Image (cartoon, coloured by chain):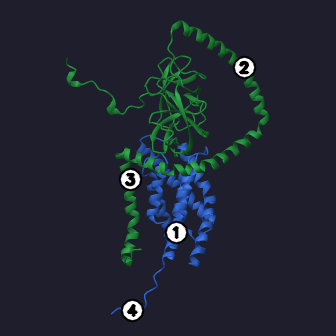
Chain colours: A green, B blue
Amino acid sequence: MIRLSVPLRQAIARLSVPALIAAAFGTMLLGKADTALVERGRMAVADLLAPIYAVSSRPVLAVRSVVLEAEALLDLRREAARLREENERLHQWQAAALALEAENAMLRRQLLFVPDPAPKFRTARVVADAGGTYARAVLIATGPFLQVEKGQVALDERGLAGRVTEVGARSARILLVTDMNSRIPVVLEGSRARAMMVGTNGARPRLQHWPSGMQPQEGERVVTSAEAATFPAGLPVGVVRIGENGWPEVELFAQLDRLDLLRIFEFGLAGILPPEAVARPDPARRGH
Amino acid sequence: MAIKGRPAEAPGLLAQLDAIARAAMPGVTTAAAMVLAAAPVGLPSLVPAVALAGVFYWSLFRPGYMPAAAAFVLGLLQDLLGFAPLGIGVLSLLLVHAGALRARPALVPRSLLLVWIAYLGVAVLAVGLGYLLQAVLGWALPSPRSAAVQLGLTAGLYPLLASLMSLLRRGLQRAESLA
């Protein structure tokens, strides 16, 4: 330990709080000025903690499953009735789907239709809540066997959950579609109207910017649009619900409050292009 | 001429290591609790609540073991664990640290209930400051509901966290009396 004289030590103790508060403002400026550095710092911390999260995810999962189990036991009867009813309904849908599939195959044969390649995906475990109070994001564990890239799309078993925004060596962050900064181009399946799905940090993102005269209707299915070349078209997103204040919202298929596994899709799309990569017309050649 | 006495015996290596481990205990346990609080249990984020309770409790009852630098580092950890703009956690935890140091003479001899009531005020101020900074730095008005949920969690978790930390504090006291 370094020995300091008493007055010097007292002066340091008195000055340390104001100096550190000034440093806090410094970090704020740094965070605003150099976002890349902050992002690297975040991913370094996440990578460092990834093994801890991986170990602790088992007990956490156990706790969560106990809670779910208790809830399930409480309304077993109602659940069984609901499932019987749903099963009947799904049998009808299955018949309809089989008929449509046969018809579709027949039509494709007649049109020489080139089908889209089936997308490949990898599954990753959600290990931590990387959101905080005012953001919605999760951390997934990656590694040498699971390489993800910025801009890839994450779905849970039901529908669209989010998008990879930051990638580290052992972990990656997924910005959920409910986050305030999330903007997803979508299509309303019934009317084929395009719209933007805007996160609000609440459970249901809002719809905005639909074409005039094509007001989204309650119960319409919402799927992704290939508009901005960041998403493949037709991924299931949710169902339109009219919110309390009359604004159309999307009830998501994905269960974002209980994510444990995410499918990370590799669509081979360009992803979110950085601004400098967007080709601009050369001003010198415009006159010709 | 200064009066010369026999110099105090230099503490041995083990004793020094022991002292360092004791001094690091509050900061390290708070950081570990914050890391564990980031686990995905389907609740809103607990990290700020845990950090605030840790810094407040230790600054109040053992300020020697929770220096301003430790509050700074814990704030940085909070900002890096979450998605919030950098600096919000750092500033609010430092201010809470400074406030708790000021309030020491008034609060330390009081009952747990009174300390909790004082903590409610601190939590309101800290969450309000966080909301304000989030609005300014993110240049968008965040939803007041998340702030309300955070305030509720911060205030509600304190008695549980404080009782755990007082167990730890008693353990530290025993270890000190043995050293």
Residue behind mark 2: A91
Q: Which class describes the residues within 10 Å of circle 1: few (<14), some (14-19), or many (20+)?
A: few
Q: Is residue B112 left or right of residue B69?
A: right
Residue at x 37% of width, y 72% of height: A11
Q: Nearer the viewer, mark 1 or mark 3?
A: 1
| Foreground tag (4 vs 3) | 4
Residue B21 tag number: 1
Q: Residue B125 or A280: which is nearer the viewer? A: A280
Type of amino acid at the residue the image marks with label 3 = Thr
Q: Position of residue A288 (x, y in %)?
A: 20, 17
Q: How far apart are the two marked residues, 1 and 3, measured between alpha carbons?
A: 29 Å
- Do the CB atoms of the residues marked 2 and 3 lie less than 8 Å apart? no
Q: Secondary structure at mark 4?
A: loop
In the rendered image, which quarter is residue A101 located in? top right
Report the disc number at residue B4.
4
Tally of marks = 4
Q: Earlier in the sequence, mark 1 or mark 4?
A: 4
Kindly identify the amino acid type of the residue bearing the numbered disc 1.
Ala
